[in-house]
Image (cartoon, helix red, strand yellow):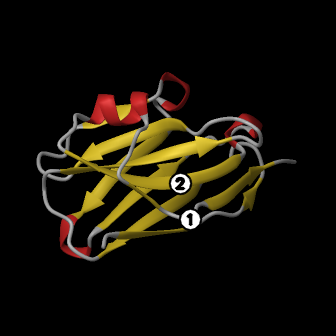
Amino acid sequence: QLQLVESGGDSVQPGGSLTLSCAASGFIADYYAIGWFHQDPGKEAEGVSCISRSDGSTYYADSVKGRFSISRDNAKNTVYLQMNSLKPEDTGVYYCAAKRDTTVQAMCVIGENDHWGQGTQVTVSS
């Protein structure tokens, strides 16, 4: 059974930076895509950024383009989300998810994923 564990959430001031990590345990094949989803209280999780394990193709939501960067280390079964120029609206719980046999855009936009982590809290406030 694939398990995803997020880490790196914290409280930062606007303009600050954070790096989130998503470590996968169990078997994960290259036909999986891994993504990060942001959830505000009372709302559904929305795709922030997704990456393909096989070719490294990426997708970013418009709200984070130019500020966030997703990367992968397949040898460590870990995906990272570098978050720069953080804004108060970036506050929320960030979940890591995995989905097989999908494109990165479909994964991030549709969000019906096969596996989810427990989430990590990011708070951006002065």
Residue holding disc 1: 118
Which residue is most to the right?
A: 126
The earlier-in-sequence mark between 1 and 2 is 2
Q: Choose between 71 and 45: the one closer to the eye.
A: 45
Q: Locate residue 122, reporting x and y percent.
A: 68, 55
Q: Residue at x 72, y 45 (%)?
A: 91
Q: Locate residue 89, reporting x and y percent.
A: 73, 35
Residue holding disc 2: 95
Q: Looking at the picture, does residue 3 appear above or below residue 95?
A: below
Q: Is residue 16 visible?
A: no
Amino acid carrying label 1: it is Gln
**On the rendered structure, is 113 left or right of 76?**
right
Q: Residue at x 34, y 36 (%)?
A: 107
Q: Looking at the picture, does residue 77 appear above or below residue 119?
A: below
**On the rendered structure, is 6 left or right of 93?**
left
SS state under label 2: strand
Which dot marks residue 65?
none
